[in-house]
Amino acid sequence: MTMRIAKFLSDNGVASRRVAEKLIANGVVAINGNVIDSPVNFVGPNDVVTVNGKQIDTQKNTELYAFYKPINTMTTAYDPHARKTIYDVLPEKYKNLRYVGRLDYKTTGLLLLTNDGELARRLTLPSSKIPRVYIATVSGNTKKLDLARRGITVDGIRYAPMKITETEPNILRIEITEGKKNEIRIVMRACGCPVVKLHRIKYGKIELGNLTPGQIKKISQKTIDEMIKTL
């Protein structure tokens, strides 16, 4: 089976497809010793792919990690504004892992990382309906939260119903399944209670637990297998 080179690099945890295309454009990717300059190249199971001269081995075992994303870090491999990224925080041995979805610059907490690009894609598909749980500190009046609980349209975009519990005044436990960009911040603002602080504590079966900012732990194969069965 052949696949596009950018997908190959993504699936093997080298980089996202977008970053892979930049690597190709920079002339650091080679197939069977031939440097390529276009993502319109395909590789098969017997091809040898190198990046900066280092051979990329096709992954044998899927690995999944829970990472506590600190505040003021970008979920990306490269930020054009030179802000700190998660890869500036991660130890060297984990820098080849791919993030599963994103947390914005100010959001903290659980971020999944994997060496399997296809698993990362499947875990973020809206159709997978994987629950993500957040603790949000909000300001303003929370009386209009039923709008979010029923589902709401903001600027022409429809957001699915959220499960929301006010555990303390202006402290909300929010569960979502779609994971649209800045979903909670946009919906809470539309409900009249903008987010002051946002922290993710759970993604599917995986919980942040007692991890501290910047820490990472490996997820058991049993948990990985259980998650894959639900996709």
Image (cartoon, helix red, strand yellow):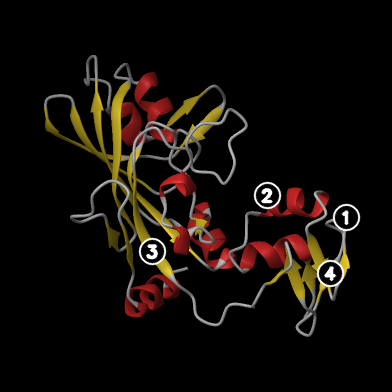
The structure residue drawn at horizontal position 73% and vertical position 61%, both measured from the top left corner, is 52
Relative to 5, is 174 on the left or the right?
left
Relative to 76, is 162 on the left or the right?
left
Instruction: Return the residue found at the far front.
Output: 53
Task: Where is residue 180? Give x, y as percent.
Answer: 49, 40
The structure residue drawn at horizontal position 18% and vertical position 55%, both measured from the top left corner, is 210
Q: Is residue 204 above or below residue 134?
A: below
Instruction: Return the residue found at the far left.
Output: 168
Q: CA distance from mark 2 to mark 4?
A: 17 Å
First-in-chain label (1 vs 4): 1
Q: In the rendered structure, which amino acid carries the disc numbered 1?
A: Asp
First-in-chain label (3 vs 2): 2
Q: In the rendered structure, which amino acid carries the disc numbered 4?
A: Phe
Badges 3 and 4: C-beta atoms under 8 Å apart? no
Circle 3 residues within 10 Å: few <14, some 14–19, many ≥20: many
Task: Where is residue 208? Give x, y as percent.
Answer: 26, 54
Q: Quadrant of residue 176?
A: top left
What mark, if any, has residue 65 been given in the picture?
Answer: 3
Question: Which residue is label 4 attached to?
Answer: 42
Question: Which residue is label 1 attached to?
Answer: 37
Question: Which residue is label 2 attached to?
Answer: 19
Q: CA distance from mark 1 to mark 4?
A: 12 Å
Badges 2 and 1: C-beta atoms under 8 Å apart? no
Relative to 66, is 74 on the left or the right?
right
First-in-chain label (2 vs 4): 2
Q: In what element is the residue under mark 3?
A: strand
Q: Number of marks in the image?
A: 4
